[in-house]
Structure formats: C-alpha cells, structure tokens
C-alpha cells in the first residue's frame, strides 16, 4: 500500500522539576540549599530513512510523544534529560504545521533531520535561588511543558525522469522494460494507482531514476481522476517525458492536454525541460511514419515500442544525456541568478 500523506500529533517531553533540598551531613548540619535542576524533556525530530518508500507507518500510529526529563535531586544533582525520538520518513517528504499550513522543513536525503516538537526545559532547583541576603531559599521551578504540534507529512517522490501520460499510455510497460521495476500492467485505464520508481541502468555504471506517475486526465489540476494527489510527485523530477500513444485519436491534442494540466497545476512544473515519447510504435503498419507533433518547447521527440523493444535503448541513452544536462543547469543556475542581480544593481546606479 502506497501512503503519501499523513497527519500525526507530536509532543515534546515535559522538563523535570527542580528540587528543594538542604545539605544535611554529620559535620555540616546546616549546609545550605543543594537542590539540583530538572532534566530537559525529549524533543521530536523527523529524519530521512532511505529504507522507506511510503508513510504507511503513520497510518497506524498517529501520536508520538517524547519522555519527560527526570526531576532534580539533592546534592545539586541535575535530573537526567530524556532521549529524543526520531520519526523515520522517506527522502522527499515535506513537513507542514497542520494547523497553520506553514512549512517546517523538507527531508531531501538520508539523515536529513527537522525538529518538529521541542522538549521542555528543566526547572531550577533551590540552589539556584541562593543569594547573600537569601541564603535558605525554598523556591524551585516546575519543568516546562514540551511543544505540542500536529504536523502533516507529504511525500513527493524524487526521481530524474517523470513519465507523464494519460491512462494506458504505456508508462508502466516502459518502466518495466528499462528498469527492474515490476509495476502492475493491464489493458484497462487506471491500472497504476500508485507511483512506481525504477532505476534504469546503462553501460559504464550509468544510471538514472524513473518515476511512473498514474494516468492524468482532463481536469486533473482540479482533483479529477487521481488528480492532485499524484501530480505532486511530478514536482520533484528533474525532467519530464510526455508519453503519447500512437493509437490516440489525436496525438497532438493528447500532448497539448497533458501540457495544459501540468501548467494549470504549477507554472514552475510546466517550465521543466521535457521530451515527447511516442509509444506503441508497433501498432503502425509497415512503412507507416509516426505522426509529427508540433512542440517547440520540447527538447525532442522519440518513437518507441516497449513491447517490441524498438527504440528503447536509444531512448535510455537520450534520457541519460537529458538528465545530465539538467543536472549541469542546476549547478549553473545559482551563479547565473547572482550575476543577474549584480547587473540589476549596476543599472540602478
């Protein structure tokens, strides 16, 4: 079961209370105040775990609370602080405050950590209140309550190439051919009900990650079909591959419809580099040419048959080079932005 959204309540541990104590030794009957401080309560963190692929664990357990700190003791002994607890999530998880909707952080890689509920501070013991004019204080502080927060976890798959297409466009079949992934494949719409990831391997130890996104239909940006729930997974991909089946009534209209849904969902997503892949080439008759699609924004158009294996190796090589170019552009973008900002300041002068 693929779970990509969960709401859980997280509570930091309460800090331990300070102690009110006075030293009483055999040769020191009035030794003065020696109450120690309380320990800090545990905090709650979210941490990236590469061994997880979904948020399934948080469907069955929706409350996470850290332990409280120990109370202070005599002889100015500080109570032990409680251990922090860590909620493991897959890389690609966004963390939001469920009440305000504000973004708390993102888990982009293994080991990334975000604190979502801070533990309470331990209270001070009476030894802390002693002064030259107040030498026998009995004051002490209770521990602070830990932070209580309801958070929303949203998983967005991280992949190099996102396969975008209508139901039965051949996305799952292509993924099964170019990688070791084994998604469910059938001849009816919406066979794919959850995103699938696969690693495409080439010679020379070259690889790239491909995400098979469930079929997109008209109105998906408004939640129709599987809609918004799965369009979110396309956001994390570096490049997009629009799959247009050659048995579609109008391939040009199919491509434009997919572009329209992507653009209505996110302008930034529509600006990603993309390529057109014409699938089911084996359905064309002998000598027939694949239809041309007018797409000036696309980096290129390739025709393949996953069933017959036609053009698949060429597609893998093309996508790998496409992804490498996108990675290089990501590195250059910060420097370009800085240069543009400097030029703007020069013009203002």
Image (cartoon, helix red, strand yellow):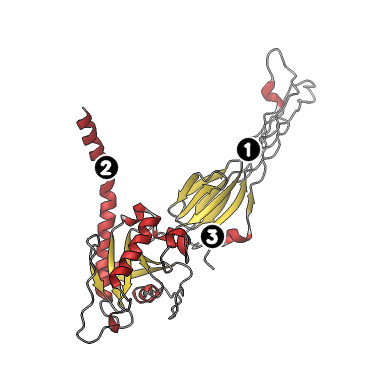
Q: How far is disc 1 from disc 3 in space, using C-alphas?
A: 28 Å
- In the image, what residue occupies the spot 75% across and 21% down? 31
Q: What secondary structure is marked by label 3?
A: loop
Q: CA distance from mark 2 to mark 1?
A: 42 Å
Residue at the bottom extreme of this rendering: 286
Q: How many numbered badges does the structure rendering display? A: 3
Callout in the foreground (2, 1) = 2
Please state which of the two labelled residues, at mark 1 or mark 3, is closer to the viewer: 3
Q: Of label 1 and label 3, which has the lower sequence position?
A: 3
Which residue sits at x=68%, y=33%? 77
Q: Is residue 347 left or right of residue 134?
A: left
Q: Position of residue 142 (x, y in %)?
A: 71, 32
Q: Nearer the viewer, residue 81 or 271?
A: 271
Residue 309: quadrant of the picture: bottom left
Seen from this angle, which residue lies furthest top? Answer: 133
Q: Position of residue 270 (x, y in %)?
A: 33, 56
Among the 4 quarters of the image, the one containing residue 29: top right
Label 2 secondary element: helix
Name the spot of residue 288 as percent of width and height, x first. 21, 83
Where does label 1 land, which residue?
120
Marker disc for residue 55: 3
Near mark 1 (Cα within 10 A), the count class, few <14, some 14-19 or many ≥20, is: many
- Which residue position is annotated with label 2? 337
Of circles 3 and 2, which is in front? Answer: 2
Asked if 88 appears above or below 121 in the picture, the reply is below
Asked which quadrant contains residue 186, the reply is bottom left
């Amino acid at each position: 079961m693929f779970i990509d959204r969960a709401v859980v309540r997280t509570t930091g541990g309460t800090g331990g209370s300070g102690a009110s104590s006075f030293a009483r030794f055999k040769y020191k009957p009035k030794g003065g105040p020696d109450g120690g401080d309380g320990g800090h309560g545990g905090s709650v963190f979210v941490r990236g775990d590469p061994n997880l692929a979904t948020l399934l664990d948080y469907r069955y357990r929706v409350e996470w609370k850290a332990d409280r700190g120990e109370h202070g003791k005599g002889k100015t002994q500080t109570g032990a602080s409680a251990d922090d607890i860590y909620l493991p999530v897959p890389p690609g998880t966004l963390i939001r405050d469920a009440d305000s909707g504000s973004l708390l952080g993102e888990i982009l890689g293994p080991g990334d950590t975000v604190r979502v509920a801070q533990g309470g501070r331990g209270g001070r013991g009476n030894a802390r209140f002693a002064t030259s004019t107040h030498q026998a204080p009995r004051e002490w502080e209770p521990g602070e309550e830990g932070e209580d927060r309801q958070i929303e976890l949203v998983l967005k798959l991280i992949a190099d190439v996102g396969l975008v297409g209508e139901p039965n466009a051949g996305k799952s079949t292509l993924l099964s051919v170019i990688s070791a992934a084994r998604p469910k494949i059938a001849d009816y719409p919406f066979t794919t009900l959850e995103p699938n990831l696969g690693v495409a391997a080439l010679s020379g130890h070259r690889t790239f990650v491909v995400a098979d996104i469930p079929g997109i239909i008209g109105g998906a940006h408004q939640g129709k079909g599987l809609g918004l729930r799965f369009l979110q997974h396309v956001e994390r991909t570096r490049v997009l591959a629009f799959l247009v089946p050659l048995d579609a009534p109008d391939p040009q209209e199919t491509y434009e419809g997919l572009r329209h849904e992507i653009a209505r969902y996110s302008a930034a997503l529509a600006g990603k580099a993309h390529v057109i892949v014409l699938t089911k080439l084996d359905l064309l008759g002998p000598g027939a040419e694949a239809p041309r699609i007018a797409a000036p924004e696309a980096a290129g158009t390739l025709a393949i048959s996953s069933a017959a294996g036609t053009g698949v190796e060429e597609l893998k090589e093309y996508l790998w080079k496409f992804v490498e170019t996108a990675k290089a552009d990501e590195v250059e973008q910060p420097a370009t932005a800085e240069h543009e900002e400097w030029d703007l300041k020069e013009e203002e002068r």
